[in-house]
Image (cartoon, rainbow, N blue to C red):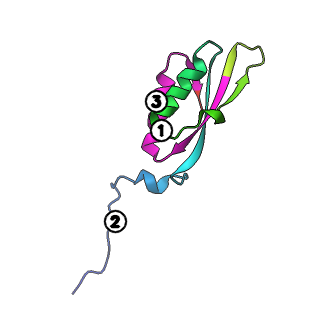
């Protein structure tokens, strides 16, 4: 007699590519906030260029805080993988000028 039951391995690690709501490649906006100091925008664009060679600095959007002490910078990168996005977020978050990355 043949056993036709199938078993599933509940300990299998899910594939993050199947769980992602993002289709790669895609244009992905990242908001970065930090103190309004010289070199802040340049530092952010250098990080973006390191992970996205096709990064277009002309798409950068800037927004001052209400009091003018902080600057919000929105960059748009071409996301090619979850790993790439994670690396960008880690690099931005680790930069000493950066306060918040969204």
In what quadrant of the picture does the C terminus appear? top right
Q: Which residue lies at the image location 51% right of the left edge and 27% below the top edge? A: 46
Q: Nearer the viewer, residue 24 or 90?
A: 24
Q: Position of residue 58 (x, y in %)?
A: 64, 34
11 over 94 or under it: above or below: below
Q: Are marks 3 and 1 in contact (CB under 8 Å)?
A: no
* Real-space CA distance between mark 2 and mark 3, rounded to the nearest whole angstrom: 35 Å
Q: Position of residue 8 (x, y in %)?
A: 34, 65
Return the residue nearer the eye: 53 or 74: 53
Q: What residue sits right under mark 1 in the picture? A: 53
> Tag 3 or tag 2, which sits nearer the N-term?
2
Sequence-wise first label, 1 or 2: 2
- Residue 80: give x, y in percent of width and height: 47, 47
| Secondary structure category for the residue under label 3 | helix
The crowding category of the residue bearing disc 1, from other C-alpha atoms within 10 Å (few below 14, some 14 to 19, many at least 20), is few
Q: Which residue is mark 3?
A: 90
Instruction: Pinpoint residue 44: horizontal percent, then vertical percent.
Output: 55, 25
Q: Which mark is residue 8?
A: 2
Label 1 with label 2: CB-CB less than 8 Å: no
Instruction: Tell me the distance, in whole angstroms, between the alpha carbons under discs 3 and 1.
Output: 18 Å
Magenta stretch holds residue 99: yes
Residue at 32% from the left image edge and 69% from the top image edge: 7
Q: Is residue 22 above or below residue 64?
A: below
Q: Is residue 20 above or below residue 9?
A: above
Element marked by disc 2? loop
Q: For the magenta stretch, what is the residue range?
A: 72-100
């Amino acid at each position: 007699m043949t056993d036709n039951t199938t078993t599933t391995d509940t300990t299998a690690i899910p594939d993050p590519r199947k769980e992602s709501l993002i289709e790669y490649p895609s244009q992905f906006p990242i908001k970065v906030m930090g103190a309004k100091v010289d070199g802040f925008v340049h530092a952010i664009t250098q990080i973006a260029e390191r992970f996205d060679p096709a990064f277009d600095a002309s798409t950068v959007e800037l927004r001052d805080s209400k009091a003018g002490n902080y600057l919000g910078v929105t960059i748009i990168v071409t996301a090619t993988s979850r790993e790439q996005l994670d690396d960008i977020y880690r690099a931005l978050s680790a930069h000493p000028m950066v306060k918040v990355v969204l």
